[in-house]
Structure formats: structure tokens, C-alpha cells
Amino acid sequence: MVEEVDRQLDEEYEVTYEVTGEKVDSIDFNAGGGDAADPKLETVDNPTLPWKKTVRLRGIEAPVVIPVTVDADGSGDLSCKILHKGRTLAEESDAGTVSVTGCVAVSPIVG
């Protein structure tokens, strides 16, 4: 049992983040590094949409992508998605919801 937990904590996996829509001011995402309790987020300012990024995470690190928009009226389409081996782990498609919560998934290693 302990060996299985240790293996899961060290196992690496890749996820692909996708953000589509009309416009976002920035995108924050877990790029790996840090740890499960305090992930290292990176930011891309004024990205061209659609935007896609594949990252390597480890163990129980949660895949996270958060498109940030300062357009308070909520106009325009915005969606985010997290993919692992072609399978969708998380997806949101309401501009208001996406810009507030983004997409967060459970690590496929433990999920």
C-alpha cells in the first residue's frame, strides 16, 4: 500500500490546456513545479485565442487553467478545457463562470 502511494506521488503525466473564445486578458495555469498544496502558476498575458499548452505535472498535482478577463459585462464566449490522453478531465463554457473559476481537475494519477 505504501509503495503504491509513493509511486503515485512520483509518477509524471501530461495534460493539455485549451482556452477558446473572443478575448482574455491573461491565462493562469499550473505549469508544474511547486507542490500539490502550493502549485506554481504561470501567467500568459494577452494570449491569442484559441490558446493551447501541454504541461508535465507530477503525482497528485491538480491541473488548473484560469482565463482572466476584466470585461465585467460578461459578453462574449469563453471556454476552457483540460485534456489527458485525449480524454476531457474538466470543461467550462460560460464566460462568467470560466473567468471566475476556470477549469480545475483531479490528477488522473489518483482520479
Image (cartoon, grey):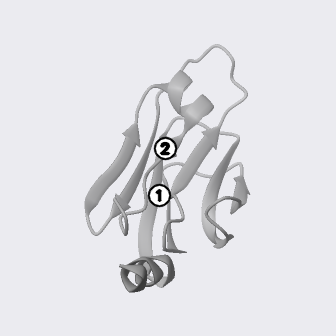
Q: Secondary structure at mark 2?
A: strand
The residue at the point 71 percent across, 48 percent down is 46
The residue at the point 43 percent across, 74 percent down is 14
Q: Position of residue 81 (x, y in %)?
A: 41, 48
Q: Quadrant of residue 68?
A: top right
Quadrant where the N terminus is found in the figure: bottom left
Q: Position of residue 4 (x, y in %)?
A: 36, 81
Q: Is residue 76 visible in the rendered structure shown here?
A: no
**Residue nearest the observer in this picture, 55 or 2:** 2
Q: Position of residue 66 (x, y in %)?
A: 60, 44
Of labels 2 and 1, the one closer to you: 2
Q: Position of residue 54 (x, y in %)?
A: 48, 70
The residue at the point 55 percent across, 50 percent down is 65
**Residue nearest the observer in this picture, 95 or 61:** 61
Answer with left or right where residue 16 lies relative to residue 57: left
Q: Quadrant of residue 94?
A: top left
Residue 12 vertical position relative to residue 92 in the rendered view, above or below: below
Answer with left or right where residue 10 lies relative to residue 85: right
Category of crowding for the residue at label 2, using alpha-carbon neighbours closer than 10 angstroms: few (below 14), some (14–19), many (at least 20): many
Answer with left or right where residue 56 lies relative to residue 82: right
Q: Which residue is mark 1?
A: 17
Category of crowding for the residue at label 1, using alpha-carbon neighbours closer than 10 angstroms: few (below 14), some (14–19), many (at least 20): many
Quadrant where the C terminus is found in the figure: bottom left
Q: Secondary structure at mark 1?
A: strand
Dot 2 and dot 1 residues touching (CB under 8 Å): yes
Q: Which residue is mark 2?
A: 103
Please state which amino acid type lies under the numbered disc 2.
Cys
The residue most toward the front is 1
Residue 26 vertical position relative to residue 85 in the rendered view, above or below: above
The residue at the point 38 percent across, 42 percent down is 91
Please state which amino acid type lies under the numbered disc 1.
Tyr
